[in-house]
Amino acid sequence: MKGKFIVLEGPDRCGKSTQAKLLYNRLVECGHEVILTREPGGTPTAERIRQIVLEPGLDIRPMAELMLYEASRAQHTQEKILPALEAGKTVICERYTMSTCAYQGYGRGIDLKVIDALNKVASLNLQPDLTLVFLMSDKYFTERGEYLFSDRLEQEDIAFRQKMRQGYLEMVKTTPNAYLVDADKHIDEIQNQVRQLLLERHIID
C-alpha cells in the first residue's frame, strides 16, 4: 500500500476520538492527505449497521453482534479504507479488528480463533501500520460519561469492561506495531506521545 494505516484502539470514553482529531489536524497541517474514519461505521451502509449494533435495549445475541461488526468492517474496508491507502493517503481509524477481539472475544467469550478468521475475511487481511491502544483507569469511565448518552456497549457492567481491558493488555504485547498509551494523562501529554510514536515508526517526518 502507498498510504499509511493508523488505528486508535481502546475502551469507550478513553479519549480516542479526541486524539484522532488532534492527530488528523496535525497531519493535515504537515501537508498529508488524511482520511479520518471509524468503526463500526465510516460509510453510509456501515453507519446504518452502527445504528443497529449500538442501539440501547436491542436484544442482539453475541454471534449476531459479531457478524454485524464484521459486515460493517467488510463494507468500510472495501469502500473507503483500501481505496484511500491505494491512493497514498493516510487513514486514521477509530477501532479496527483488535476491538472485535477485545469486546466480542474477551468480553463476550466468543472463540478468538473464530473472530480472527472472520476479521481476516472482512478486512481482506489488512494490517495497520501502527496501532495505538489507549487504556485508562476504570474510574474515568464513570466520570467522563456522567453527562453522556450511553450506547448499548457502554451500558455493559464493570465485569465486562475488566475482561475487555485485560484483552487489550494481552493483545498489545503480541500484535505487531502496537503500542500502549496511558489515557489517564493530560490530553496534550497523550498527543505528544502519539506524535512521538509516529515519528519513531517513520509514519510522519
Image (cartoon, helix red, strand yellow):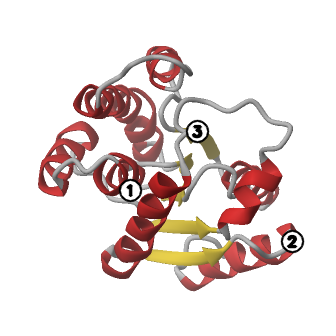
Instruction: Tell me the quadrant of the picture where the N terminus can be found.
Output: bottom left
Answer with the quarter of the image where residue 59 lies: top left
* Residue 23 appears in the picture as rendered: no
Could you say which disc has been placed on residue 37 in the image? 3
Q: Residues within 10 Å of mark 2 (few under 14, many from 20)?
A: few
Name the residue located 75 percent from the left edge and 49 percent from the top edge: 21
Instruction: Give the distance between the C-alpha atoms of the residues marked 2 and 3, in whole angstroms.
Output: 22 Å
Residue 61 higher or lower than 17, as above or below: above
Q: Nearer the viewer, mark 3 or mark 1?
A: 1
* Residue 185 point in image, percent of width and height: 79, 76
Instruction: Give the distance between the C-alpha atoms of the residues marked 3 and 1, in whole angstroms.
Output: 20 Å
What amino acid is at disc 2? Answer: Asp
The reply to whether the C-beta atoms of the residues labelled 2 and 1 are less than 8 Å apart is: no
Q: Residue furthest bottom?
A: 200
What amino acid is at disc 3? Answer: Thr
Of 17 and 199, nearer the camera is 17
Q: Residues within 10 Å of mark 3 (few under 14, many from 20)?
A: many
* Residue 106 point in image, percent of width and height: 32, 57
Secondary-structure class at tag 3: strand
Q: Nearer the viewer, mark 2 or mark 1?
A: 1
Among numbered discs 2 and 1, the one appearing first in the sequence: 1
Q: Nearer the viewer, mark 2 or mark 3?
A: 2
Q: Is residue 189 left or right of residue 110?
A: right
Instruction: Give the distance between the C-alpha atoms of the residues marked 2 and 1, in whole angstroms.
Output: 27 Å
Among numbered discs 2 and 3, the one appearing first in the sequence: 3
* Residue 119 point in image, percent of width and height: 24, 46
Residue 90 higher or lower than 198, as above or below: above
Could you say which disc has been placed on residue 188 in the image? 2
The reply to whether the C-beta atoms of the residues labelled 3 and 1 are less than 8 Å apart is: no
Name the residue located 39 percent from the left edge and 44 percent from the top edge: 86
Q: Which residue is mark 1?
A: 102
Of 112 and 158, nearer the camera is 158
